Image: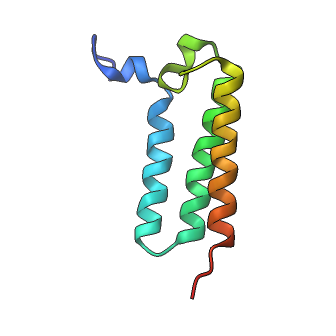
């Protein structure tokens, strides 16, 4: 579905990241905190990889700043979420 003037084309791979984060939030809601964190971290790590290997126009909504800073921020976010979800005390 690529309608002219719609956000589908301009945001590009951003929708994959949004889906992974959404899936992680659903898993959180279902009580699967670690698995939800892994899903969210995986989404941000994939976004970092996509941003690293594609051009600015190919990255769509993932491209916000310069390439190096975008990749660094996305990887830091993925690592932070992964560590936080792995070390949270579940009782």
Relative to 24, is 43 on the left or the right? Answer: right
Q: Residue at x 33, y 18 (%)?
A: 2
Q: Position of residue 38 (x, y in %)?
A: 62, 58
User: Looking at the image, is 47 positioned above or below residue 22?
Assistant: above
User: Looking at the image, is 57 positioned above or below residue 21?
Assistant: above
Relative to 8, is 79 on the left or the right? Answer: right
Q: Nearer the viewer, residue 62 or 27?
A: 62
Q: Position of residue 29 (x, y in %)?
A: 40, 69
Q: How many marks?
A: 0
Relative to 25, is 82 on the left or the right? Answer: right
Quadrant that contains the N terminus = top left
Q: Nearer the viewer, residue 15 or 87?
A: 87
Q: Which residue is drawn at 64% across and 25% down?
A: 51
The answer to which quarter of the image holds residue 70 is: top right
User: Looking at the image, is 72 positioned above or below residue 77?
Assistant: above
According to the image, what is the colour scheme of the structure?
rainbow
Q: Residue furthest bottom?
A: 91
Quadrant that contains the C terminus = bottom right
The answer to which quarter of the image holds residue 76 is: top right
Q: Residue at x 70, y 61 (%)?
A: 83
Q: Which residue is drawn at 54% across and 70% down?
A: 33
Q: Where is residue 56 in the image (x, y as percent from the top left)?
A: 58, 13
């Amino acid at each position: 579905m690529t309608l002219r003037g719609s956000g589908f084309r301009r945001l590009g791979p951003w929708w994959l990241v949004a889906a992974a984060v959404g899936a992680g939030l659903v898993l959180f809601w279902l009580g699967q905190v670690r698995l939800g964190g892994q899903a969210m971290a995986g989404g941000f790590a994939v976004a970092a990889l996509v941003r690293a290997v594609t051009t600015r126009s190919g990255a769509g909504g993932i491209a916000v700043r310069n390439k190096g800073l975008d990749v660094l921020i996305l990887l830091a976010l993925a690592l932070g979420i992964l560590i936080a979800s792995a070390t949270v005390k579940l009782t």
